[in-house]
Amino acid sequence: MFPVQLMQSNRYVLPRLALIGDAAHCCHPVGGQGLNMGIRDAAALAQVLQEAHNQGEDIGDLQILKRYESWRKQENLAILGFTDLLDRIFSNDWLPIVVIRRIGLLMLQKVKPVKTYALQLMTGLKGRTPEIAQRF
Ligand SMILES: Cc1cc2nc3c(=O)[nH]c(=O)nc-3n(C[C@H](O)[C@H](O)[C@H](O)COP(=O)(O)OP(=O)(O)OC[C@H]3O[C@@H](n4cnc5c(N)ncnc54)[C@H](O)[C@@H]3O)c2cc1C
């Protein structure tokens, strides 16, 4: 067992090894993002490996696998950070935080650019979307 809180592996890859999904990162379920990130990891890794294979490169080579790591690690970190912030804000009853939380929720509801940005971030439309995910 491990706690459901922000965690991210320092490295996603080693020669002939790649971590995806909860093996690579974990967050509180408040944002409903863990599975989504794992699916995008899988799609990104598949794309990197397919492209390497098409070029006749060794798909287990560390330099190839690092393309996957540098693609996904930063994007996951943004969502992990956002989810962690939500968890901290929603598990705190200190009045100033309650006020900030209510203002934030109101902004999400009423301010269209804020709503659009949050939706894009949480649905994986921010950053580089794997080709396989663009087909659906
Ligand atoms: C309460 C809760 C609610 C959640 N709600 C959402 C949500 O709404 N939306 C969302 O996107 N995500 C949600 N998540 C997160 C999501 O469930 C996980 O991110 C996702 O299941 C991770 O998938 P995974 O395949 O990486 O790992 P897992 O689902 O953990 O799969 C790993 C598998 O490997 C098996 N295993 C482990 N060790 C070994 C071994 N040595 N040999 C063989 N098999 C092994 C395990 O039994 C398990 O079946 C939620 C999580 C929790 C806890």
Image: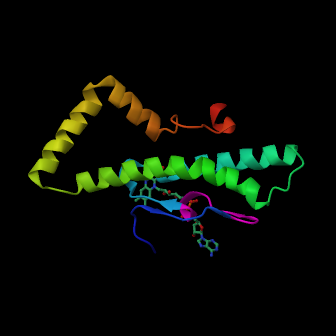
Numbered marks: total: 0
Q: Residue furthest left?
A: 95
Question: Which residue is depicted at the point 24% across and 37% down?
Answer: 105
Quarter occupied by residue 93: bottom left
> Where does the magenta region start and end?
14-24
Front in this rendered view, residue 21 or 69 = 69
Residue 25, image x, y percentages: 51, 60
Question: Where, quadrant-wise, is the C terminus in this rendering?
Answer: top right
The picture places residue 120, in percent across and down from the top left corner, at 46, 33
Compared to 27, does 110 lie above or below? above
Residue 33 visible here: no
Above or below 120: residue 53: below
In this image, 101 relative to 11: left or right?
Answer: left
Magenta-drawn stretch contains 17: yes
Outermost residue, bottom side: 1
**Which colour style is shown?**
rainbow
Residue drawn where x is 45% and y is 38% of the image: 121
Is 23 part of what is drawn in magenta? yes
Q: Position of residue 24 (x, y in %)?
A: 56, 62
At horizontal 59% and vertical 37% (from top left) the residue drawn is 128
